[in-house]
C-alpha cells in the first residue's frame, strides 16, 4: 500500500530544501529513522515548532529517499484531522476493525499536526493504540505538531 496522496503531492517531494544549522538535529534524527535498514532506534520522532518552520518540508524532502531504500514499504502520510475524520467515519459505519487494519500494519506512518487532537480523547486513545501496534511490529512513525509533547 502506498500513500493515498495524489500526483501533486508527489511533485512537491522534489522541491529543493536547505537544512539550516538550527534544524540540523531534527534533520539528522529524521534521516536516521528513514534510512535505517533495520528497526531504527528510536522508532518514533516527534517534531514540533511553530507553523512554517519547515517540519513538513523536511519530511517531504526525505521521504523519497525512504521510498527508494524501502520500495515495498507500506506507508501513509496524513494529518491528524484526516486520522480523526477516518476514525469518526469508521465508528459511525461500525467499521473500526477495517480502519485499524488499514493503519496498524504500516511500515511508516507520518502524522502531521497532531496538536489538533488536543481535546479528542477517544481519537487520542485510538491513535495511541495505532502507534503502539506500528511500533510493536518494528514500524516507524514521524509525528509533527506546533506544540511540544505532553
Image (spheres, rainbow, N blue to C red):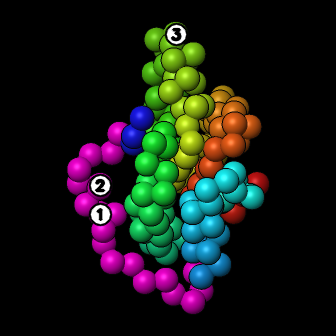
Identify residue for label 3.
94
Q: How many residues crowd around disc 1 within 10 Å: few (fewer than 14), some, or many (20 or more)?
A: few
* Residue at 74% in and 37% down: 136
Q: How many residues crowd around disc 2 within 10 Å: few (fewer than 14), some, or many (20 or more)?
A: few
Q: Secondary structure at mark 1?
A: helix
Query: Which residue extends farthest bottom?
Result: 21
Let me know if residue 19 is in the magenta part.
yes
Give how far across and how far down residue 8 sits, in percent.
Answer: 23, 54
Q: Secondary structure at mark 3?
A: loop
Q: Which of these two is toward me, 107 or 133?
A: 107
Q: Which mark is residue 105?
A: none
Give the total of numbered labels. 3
Q: Where, quadrant-wise, is the C terminus in this rendering?
A: bottom right
- Residue 115 seen in this snapshot: no
Asked if marks 2 and 1 touch (Cβ < 8 Å), the reply is yes
Q: Which mark is residue 9?
A: 2
Identify residue for label 1.
12
Up-down: is 28 above or below 34?
below
Q: Earlier in the sequence, mark 1 or mark 3?
A: 1
* Residue at 75% in and 58% down: 41
Q: Is residue 72 left or right of residue 4?
A: right
Q: What's the magenta region?
A: 4-23
Amino acid at each position: 500500500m502506498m500513500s493515498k496522496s495524489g500526483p501533486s503531492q508527489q511533485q512537491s517531494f522534489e522541491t529543493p530544501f536547505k537544512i539550516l544549522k538550527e534544524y540540523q538535529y531534527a534533520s539528522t534524527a529524521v534521516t536516521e529513522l528513514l534510512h535505517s535498514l533495520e528497526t531504527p532506534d528510536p522508532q518514533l520522532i516527534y517534531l514540533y515548532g511553530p507553523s512554517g518552520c519547515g517540519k513538513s518540508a523536511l519530511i517531504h524532502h526525505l521521504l523519497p529517499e525512504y521510498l527508494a531504500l524501502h520500495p515495498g514499504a507500506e506507508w501513509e502520510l496524513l494529518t491528524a484531522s484526516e486520522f480523526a475524520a477516518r476514525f469518526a467515519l469508521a465508528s459511525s459505519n461500525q467499521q473500526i476493525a477495517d480502519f485499524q487494519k488499514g493503519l496498524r500494519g504500516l511500515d511508516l506512518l507520518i502524522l502531521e499536526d497532531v496538536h489538533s487532537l488536543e481535546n479528542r480523547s477517544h481519537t487520542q486513545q485510538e491513535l495511541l493504540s495505532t502507534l503502539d501496534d506500528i511500533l510493536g511490529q518494528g514500524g516507524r512513525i514521524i509525528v509533527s505538531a506546533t506544540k511540544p509533547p505532553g
